[in-house]
Amino acid sequence: MSTDHAKKIRVVKPEDVIWEESIRGPEEHTDPGQECTVAKSEDEKFTTGLWQREQQDRYFERPYHEIAFIIEGEVEITDMDGDMVRAGPGDILITPRGSMGHWKNLSPVKKFWAIYEEPGSELKSYLGPGAF
């Protein structure tokens, strides 16, 4: 990518998004949903995009850090200790590298995600004001 292009401010309008079929695990038998990559670093360690899916109910294991802003819908995530969290519109969902559990869409979901894939990196979650 040229340096001049990389420094340009751009806007991605909803009508400009090109949706592609999401990757579906071998254990999944529902519609795979759609996603698009919005931006990716040259070293491919940082990627952002959009994801939408009507249904999903599956085990997951994160080999990367993911931060997701839930735009629409609601999800329920149960970790390996049995602790359950719900996230809905306006919530930010943080799933650090190495986290495992069960993801379930409670309704059709659309999210904006950011993934960081640096081996050995740790994630310091929520550094803003207020309780966490």
Image (cartoon, rainbow, N blue to C red):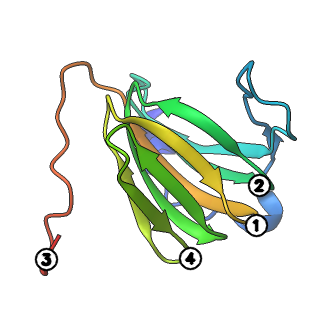
Between 16 and 92, the one nearer to me in the picture = 92
User: Looking at the image, which residue is at 28% across and 24% down?
Assistant: 118
Residue type at mark 3 is Ala
Q: Which quadrant holds residue 34? A: top right
Residue 21 location, x and y as percent?
82, 36
User: Looking at the image, which residue is at 53% across and 41% down?
Assistant: 102
Label 3: few (<14), some or many (≥20) within 10 Å?
Answer: few
> Could you tell which of marks 3 and 2 lies nearer the N-terminus?
2
Q: CA distance from mark 1 to mark 3?
A: 34 Å
Q: Secondary structure at mark 1?
A: helix
Q: Which mark is residue 131?
A: 3
Contact (Cβ within 8 Å) of mark 2 with mark 4: no
Q: Which mark is residue 14?
A: 1
Residue type at mark 4 is Pro
Q: Looking at the image, how many numbered discs can be counted on the residues? A: 4
Q: Nearer the viewer, mark 2 or mark 4?
A: 4
> Could you tell which of marks 2 and 4 lies nearer the N-terminus?
2
User: Looking at the image, which residue is at 31% across and 41% down?
Assistant: 81
Q: Nearer the viewer, mark 3 or mark 2?
A: 3
